Each structure stands twice: as structure tokens, then as C-alpha cells.
Image: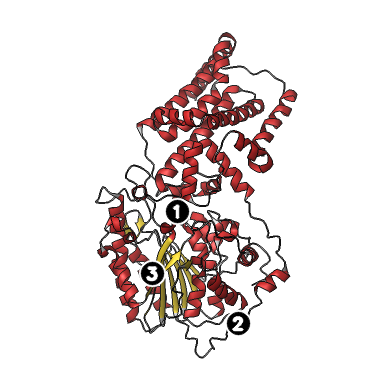
Amino acid sequence: MKFIKDTALKISLSVKKLNQKREQNGSTYRMTNFFLTLLFPVFIVLMAELNQGKYPSKLVMFIVNKPTVLIFDILVAAVIFTALTLLFRKIWRAVAVQSVVYFLLSVTELFKYGTNGNHLLLTDMKLIKSVKSLTSFAYIKITPHLVVYTLIVLIYLAAVFWFNPQFKLSIKKSIAPAAACIASVLSMFFISGFSKPVYSFFDIDTTEADNVFILNEKFENNSFLAFFCETASENIANKLKAPENYTEKTIEDCLNVEVEDISTDSDFKKPNVIVIMSEALADFRVFDELQVSDKYYSGFDKMADEGYRGKLIVPTFASYTVRTEFELLFGLPVKSLNDPNMPQRKLADREQPSIVRYYKSFGYDTAYVHPFLSSFYSRKRVYGTFGFDQMYFEDSLTVPVEYSGSYINDETVFNQLEKLVEETDNPIYIHTTTMQNHQPYTTGKYPNELDNYLENVKLTSDALTVFLDNLKKIDEPTLVFLVGDHFPSFKNDSENIYDKLNINSSTCGVVYEQNYFLWSNYNQDYSEVPQEKFSAFYVPYVLLNLIGAPKDTFIQAMSEKMETLPVYSTQYDSHIPNDDELDVLTYDRVIGDNISG
């Protein structure tokens, strides 16, 4: 006990002596402190930007080409620094907080872009609760440049702490200017009438970002800080609101259709329906210059030969799987929700009228299978409102689990699906979102990411062949639908395959086109399946039509809409005008009063 007290006393005396020295430094080194304070906004902006380009030469070139953008960044940093100083009343504390926030954001942007080719957006902050999940597939590499830049920031912070620049202004006199600084920063985000002329004055690129490729080009024009600020303003300005024409009368007009009587209880055989959304599955044979062998896709080709192959338009590229998942589960377009990265976070907190509930009303059992953490994207909580009888995640699968790299392999998932079909007395509807082919692709027996990716695809292909053969042996009619949620993302370095293929904002349509497959273990007629490509959210209506399910006015209206507007996707084609009927129905069902339900 005496030792602890003596140690505590020594520490207390050392801290007191340190603070006395710092107080003395604050008075002695006035000029040093003046420049440390004055130059801090410039310093932290340069360090945050330098961390993106890795090399000073790239930052210099950006400053030469876009000096006004850098001035904008510095002014914003200065206003934030002033507000923090006025609030904390200690300059070193303001420096510490702003340094940590700016540099952490910079490092997060660096890792995020290196992982999936998508730049950091304000909306990504919603994933902060899923850090554990994200680190399992994020490409995090501590480079010498990152270490050096981090040390420089820490040294600057230590210098400010040691020399201790003084701030002398009463609390009463600090409140008003602090509020003014905070208000000016918030205005950049929330008041377009203020931000737009400011962005224009500083030559900030405000091009409407319809897809990741346009965002990437905007980042090159604005660099990190201005990009983060401008896209945050854009996101807030595009906040989803109820359509002006959202009324009960409008919904009635949308559903004023004649329902086709295409089935009766006697001829509705109720086959099992399995929807497989395969993580990052894409057919790279579409790029002739890659000369990809058919061996990787033999199982999918077999599925197509025995069933049907078509082409879908998916609403995302490289990441944000839940966009495609939302469209498949709700039969509604994410475009009508202003293309959120995470549409499930837009849903009203209530039981949701998903497509799952139609199958339940037909007498089906329903199940959701996802071999990953139930907490990621809040799936267990949110999807629990969709009407699934059973939900299976990585810790609740009922078959032996095997891995391919970091993830549960697709063979395990197929075994789980097969078991559900065999053990369920009623017909069953299953939606599964796989994980095996998720990034990163830097690990494997090949140095090339694409080759490692294709090896995983072959594993899926082989497992799929076995799965379909097993379904043939089960005496239950079963319809299987399979599609990849998006093309995979590769590390954005000199070896990036999309750069080599010259995929950019004007040529990116091809990576939003995905092959889909229909297969059944009974004699299914696919002649009425649309021959042209269509958006993924129409898939539920195609499946319901194939199995001869009864239709209500909503299903009929959406089926007719598929004929007149087969593609409705901002990501794929930003020139497609908004459709009032789709927008109103989507808002009504997932956010509004569900008048159409």
C-alpha cells in the first residue's frame, strides 16, 4: 500500500511539474505558439490529403491544379478549429480532437477505397456498429508512408501540448462566435442555398454522383476533404421525403388494374422456391480480352442448359450487397428510395410487406440463410420484420460447417438449403445470401486477384452441380433462382482489373449487368420469362408467375410495369426519368402507411 501511495505521489508531482513547465512555455514561446496555432488548419488538411496520395508529389500536383479546393479545405478546417478552441478553451485540446478526427477519417478513406474501390461517404458512418464485421474483409495494410504521416501528426500534437499556446477569452464572449462557427459549418451540409454558391466559388466538383465510377472521378477532382464535405451535402439534400402525390387516391390509381385469373387452388402446385443471391458472382467471360476459361463456370452453364439463363440489372457494384438483396426481397427499386447504400435503414420500424409474406399467405414455410454475422447490416433485427419463419446465420446453421478462406463456403450453404427442403413438410420459400466469394482476393495460390477470385467461383460452380443433382433426387418440385449481387471489387492499385478494362463512368454499364439462372427439378416452362434484360426488383414477379401463384392488384400492377419499364436503375442509367407510380408504391410499402398492402 505504501508503495502505491508513493508511486501516486511521484506521478502527481511529475504532472504538476510538467504543467508548471507548460504554463511557463505558454508565456515564453509566444511566437512559436502563434505559428503553431495559425498553421494548424493548413497542417492538418495537408496531412489528411497527403495520406491519400501517399507521395508528396501527387499532393503538390493537386495543389497546382486545384488551388481553390485546397483553400476551401483550409478555411473549413480553420472554422472547425476556431469552434473547438472556443468550446474547449484549451488550444491543445482543440488540436488533439481535430487531429484525431481528420486523420482517422483519412485513414478510413484510405482503407475503404483500397478494399472495395468505394470512397468514404457520410452514410458509411452508419456502419460504425459493424466494425468487427468490416475488419474481417477490409484490406488494412500498415505502410511506411502511413506510419511516417501518423508520427508527424503526433509530433505536431506533442509540440502544441508542450509549448501550450494560450487562449484568453471569457466563456460569455466565446459562446456567440463558437455558435457562429458551428452554424456556418452545418450550413454547408444542411442549407443548399448556402453551400451551392460556396462550392461554385471554390470550384468544387458538384456533379451529381449516380454511381461509384462518377464518385471516383469526383474524388479525383475534389480530393478527400472537399469530396467528403460535398457528398455529405448532396446526401442530406437528397434525403428521402414523401412524394408530393402520396395519397390514398394515388395508390388506388396505381393499383387500378385488372387482375389476371391465371390459377386456381387445384392447379397451383406450390413448388419449393429457392432464391440464391451469390456473393460477388460475376461472369468475367463477358470481357473477351481476359480470355477466361469456361471451366470456372461449368456448373452455371450446366444450370443454364437444363433451365434458363437471362440478364438482370443490379443496383450496385463492388459493395453494398443489401441494395440487391432489398430489391429481391421487396420487389421494389432502390432508385425510388434515392439509391441509399443501405436501404434497410430506410424502412419504417414495423412489420414489412416483403415478398416473403406472399409465400406465407400461399401456405409456404419461409427461411432466410446467411452464413455470416447476424449483426452485420443489422440483418437479424431488421429482417426479422420481413416474415421469415426461420433465420439461419453463421452461428445457427444445422449442417457441418466448412470454410473457404475466411468465409463459410457455398457447399455448406447448399447443404443447408437441401436439408431445409427435406425436413419441411410444407412447400418452402428460401432466400439465401452467400459469403464465400467475398473480398479480399489477395490471399490464395495466385499473385493475381482475378485468378484467386475465379478459383473460388469454380468451388461454387462445382458445389452447385452437386446441389442441383441432389435436388433431382428429392421427390418435391423445386424451382431455383440464382444471381450474383454485384461484380466483385478488387484492390485499387496498379493491378486493378477494371482500370485495365477501361471501365469508367461512360463504360460502366456492363458491370451492372448480371447473368441470372432459373432451374427446376420438374418440367418448367420458361417461355413467358422476359427475353430482354430487366431490373432485379422484378424477379419476384417473374418467379410468382412461373409457379402460377395467385395475383393481387399490386403484383399485377408491378408485372405490367415490367413490360413498360423493364429497367429502372440510376446506377445503370442515370438518364431514366423518375416513375411516379414506382416511387409512390415503394414509399407506401416500406415507409408510408402501406395502403397498397
Inspect the image, locate mark 3, and give the three-letter code of the amino acid beneath it. Gln
Q: Quadrant of residue 465?
A: bottom left
Residue identified by numbered label 2:
259
Element class at badge 2: loop
Query: How far is the residue under mark 1 from the one under mark 2?
Result: 38 Å
Query: How far is the residue under mark 2 from the one under mark 3?
Result: 37 Å
Element class at badge 3: helix
Q: Picture coordinates of residue 70 (x, y %)?
A: 53, 30
Inspect the image, locate mark 2, and give the three-letter code of the amino acid beneath it. Val
Q: Is residue 452 left or right of residue 259?
A: left
Residue 55 visible, this orientation: yes
Question: Residue at left 54%, top 27%?
Answer: 96
Question: Residue at left 73%, top 71%?
Answer: 249
Q: Badge 2, how many Cα within 10 Å: few under 14, some, many 20+?
A: some
Which mark sits nearer the N-terminus, 1 or 2? 2
- Nearest-to-viewer mark from 1 and 2: 2
Q: Is residue 86 left or right of residue 148?
A: right
Q: Quadrant of the C terminus?
A: bottom right
Q: Nearer the viewer, residue 578 or 416?
A: 578
Q: Quadrant of residue 386?
A: bottom right
- Please identify the residue farthest to the bottom as the structure is shown: 266
Question: Residue at left 43%, top 39%?
Answer: 110
Q: Picture coordinates of residue 488 (x, y %)?
A: 38, 55
Element class at badge 1: loop
Q: Picture coordinates of residue 104 (x, y %)?
A: 49, 36
171 shown above or below 379: above
Residue identified by numbered label 1:
319
- Please identify the residue farthest to the right as the structure is shown: 172
Residue identified by numbered label 3:
416
Which mark sits nearer the N-terminus, 3 or 1? 1
Q: Picture coordinates of residue 243 (x, y %)?
A: 68, 60
Q: Quadrant of residue 283?
A: bottom left
